[in-house]
Image: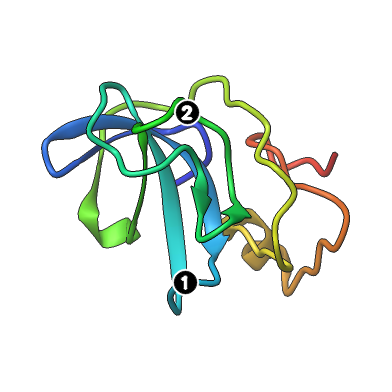
Amino acid sequence: VSLGQQVSWNGKKATVRYIGNVKFAAGEWAGLELMDAGGVHEGNVMGVPYFECPAARGVFAQAAQLVSQATPVATTTPVAAPMAVATRAAEDEGPATLPSKERTADGSVS
């Protein structure tokens, strides 16, 4: 799973907008923007912003729940992570702490 990737979750089409740790559960989670309403938030969970999307279009899911639909597409920039986030690309390079920088869909740091 990668940022900007088109996936299917519970039969609904979505775009991956966030990958990483969250404060509400253990493990790595994917933040999804659903193509249609049916989500539960707009990228904020319990007051913590993880990504931005229209209201009622955001959900979080485990990677195992996702089915790939296509190659990555252009993404919106995730909001600043609430804690250090290691994306899959960063894990390939070793541990990464990004206190004030974000990793973009193409793997560069902004």
Q: Identify which amino acid the numbered label 1 is placed on.
A: Phe
Q: Quadrant of the C terminus?
A: top right
Which residue was labeled with disc 1? Answer: 24
In the rendered structure, the answer to whether residue 42 lies left or right of residue 106 reads left
Which residue was labeled with disc 2? Answer: 72
Neighbour tally class for label 1: few under 14, some 14-19, many 20 plus, Cα within 10 Å: few
Q: Secondary structure at mark 2?
A: loop
Question: How many circles with numbers are drawn on the protein?
Answer: 2
- The picture quadrant where one finds residue 85 is bottom right
Closer to the camera: disc 1 or disc 2? 1
Please say if 88 is above or below 94.
above
- The picture quadrant where one finds residue 67 is top left
Residue at image coords 68%, 32%: 77
Residue 106: x and y, percent? 67, 34
Residue 47: x and y, percent? 58, 56
Q: Identify which amino acid the numbered label 2 is placed on.
A: Pro
Neighbour tally class for label 2: few under 14, some 14-19, many 20 plus, Cα within 10 Å: some
Residue at image coords 69%, 42%: 79
Q: Secondary structure at mark 1?
A: loop
| Residue sitting nearer the eye, 51 or 93 | 51
